[in-house]
């Protein structure tokens, strides 16, 4: 799951259930606010946290994300309508990613749906949508209860995430199946998740037990905490766009400025042949042919900033929306909003003063771009076969 943009102005951010535990191991003491909750930016150093997640496993406080318990006989139908996730097809314990769209097919937010039982689901989104969910449930036997403030949630990411959780006494879920277990006497729900290209497990448990579970994972599994700055690098490397940073929610833009799934590189999360969902008709009939789109770039520089101009053939074609220095690639990785006509070409980035120079940039193949390419290829083959 991807964090949304940090809050611009929040006078007094709330403490997540894991705030005290995170603060006790934060040497840098650098924080920001997400959805009104305090979130750590750095614990020790960005490079050390990044390396821990890539080579071993790291632990992150996922408390700032929005969570809803969706109950009722029509819960699956409700979620299949309000998100593009295949909720009707999920078996108990299975999870799937999707999007929340407006009627015209514009992207409102990302979404993850987990089926916990026949009539109980967990919906996780970067930002809160209580009013939208309440309206969408009218006439259905389904209720979406906001449980964000009632539970603690942490993620364990990295190649050794399963071993780390096992060392802490938690039987990890399978590749697609959620499970429950006891961690030092605390009932804990665990489900497999992805953060960018990293696989991991999300643990959700009563907020009063937050310190108990954190301490267990720290002491028994030796997990390093990871903050938003290191997670940002992993996110961009995976090609996962960030709401409020790389694109604005369709709720905040006019109808002319909304972004469709294909424009943000996530067409595979809203397949129009999957079934009916809100925004499907807009994608099929109303959405204009995209003139712009997000691409992920590898830039031949160790310096760049959001907002800098992207050029192709010497002409401005877009701008950087987010960027970070990748310790693995030793260069900047970035999202860029560019003209669709230039996709597949090499680019140049015009660095701002005092550097004020042009540096080369190439498309970076990512986990999300590979999924999108496979989906678009399948769609073209299906179209050709019907001719």
Image: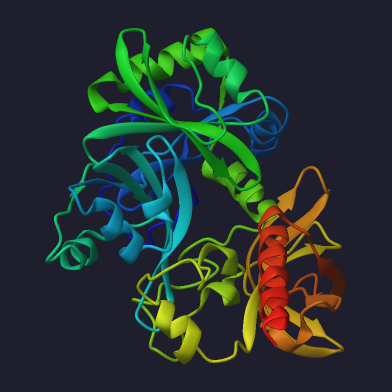
Q: Is 182 rendered above or below residue 374?
A: above
Image coordinates of residue 263 in percent, x first then y, are 59, 77
The quarter of the rendered structure image containing the C terminus is: bottom right
Residue 244 position, x and y percent, is: 46, 66
Where residue 309 appears, as percent x and y from the top left, is: 71, 80
- Along the viewing direction, whichever of 210 and 177 lies nearer the viewer: 177
Q: Where is residue 202 drawn, in percent x and y? A: 45, 33
- Residues 311 and 57: in front is 57
Q: Quadrant of residue 104?
A: bottom left
Residue 9 figure quarter: bottom left
User: In terms of image quadrants, where is residue 203?
Assistant: top left
Residue sitting at the far front: 386
Say left or right for 244 vs 311. left
Q: Is residue 17 in view?
A: yes
In the picture, measured across the screen, residue 33 lies left or right of residue 42, that is left
State the residue in front, 312 or 83.
83
* Residue 75, above or below 241: above
Rendered position, 334 above or below 61: below
Above/below status of 109 relative to 179: below
In the image: residue 165, left or right of residue 144: right
Q: Residue at x 37, y 70 (%)?
A: 277
Residue sitting at 47 percent across and 90 percent down?
285
Depth check, front residue: 192 or 302: 192
Residue pictured at 70% horizontal, 53% vertical: 367
Q: Is residue 258 visible?
A: no
What residue is rendered at 32% in x and 22% in y?
A: 210
């Amino acid at each position: 799951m991807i964090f949304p943009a940090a809050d611009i102005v929040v006078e007094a951010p709330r403490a997540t259930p894991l705030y005290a535990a995170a603060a006790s191991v934060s040497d840098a003491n650098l924080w920001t606010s997400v959805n009104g909750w305090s979130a750590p930016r750095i614990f020790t150093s960005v490079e050390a946290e990044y390396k821990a997640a890539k080579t071993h496993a790291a632990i992150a406080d996922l408390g700032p994300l929005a969570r809803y318990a969706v109950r009722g006989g029509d819960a699956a139908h409700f979620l299949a309508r309000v998100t593009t996730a295949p909720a009707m097809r999920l078996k108990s314990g299975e999870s799937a990613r999707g999007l929340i769209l407006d009627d015209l097919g514009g992207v409102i937010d990302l979404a993850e749906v987990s089926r916990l039982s026949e009539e109980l689901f967990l919906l996780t989104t970067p930002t809160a949508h209580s009013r939208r969910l309440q309206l969408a449930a009218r006439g259905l036997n389904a209720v979406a209860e906001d449980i964000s403030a009632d539970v603690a949630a942490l993620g364990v990411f990295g190649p050794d995430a399963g071993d780390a959780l096992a060392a802490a006494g938690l039987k990890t879920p399978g590749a697609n199946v959620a499970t429950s277990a006891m961690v030092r006497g605390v009932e804990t729900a665990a489900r497999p998740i992805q953060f960018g290209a990293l696989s991991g497990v999300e643990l959700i448990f009563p907020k009063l037990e937050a310190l108990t579970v954190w301490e267990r994972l720290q002491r028994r599994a030796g997990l390093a905490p990871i903050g938003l700055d290191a997670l940002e690098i992993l996110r961009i490397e995976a090609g996962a766009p960030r709401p409020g940073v790389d694109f604005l929610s369709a709720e905040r833009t006019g109808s002319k400025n909304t972004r469709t799934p294909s424009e943000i590189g996530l067409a595979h999360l809203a397949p129009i042949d999957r079934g009916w969902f809100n925004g499907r008709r807009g994608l099929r009939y109303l959405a204009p042919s995209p003139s712009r789109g997000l691409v992920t770039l590898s830039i031949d520089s160790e310096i760049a900033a959001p907002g800098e101009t992207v050029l192709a053939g010497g002409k401005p074609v877009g701008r950087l929306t987010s960027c970070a220095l990748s310790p693995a690639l030793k260069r900047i990785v970035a999202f860029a909003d560019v003209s669709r006509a230039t996709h597949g070409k090499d680019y140049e980035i015009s660095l701002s003063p005092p550097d004020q120079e042009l540096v080369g940039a190439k498309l970076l193949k990512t986990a999300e771009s590979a999924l999108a390419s496979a989906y678009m290829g399948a769609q073209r083959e299906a179209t050709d076969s019907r001719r």
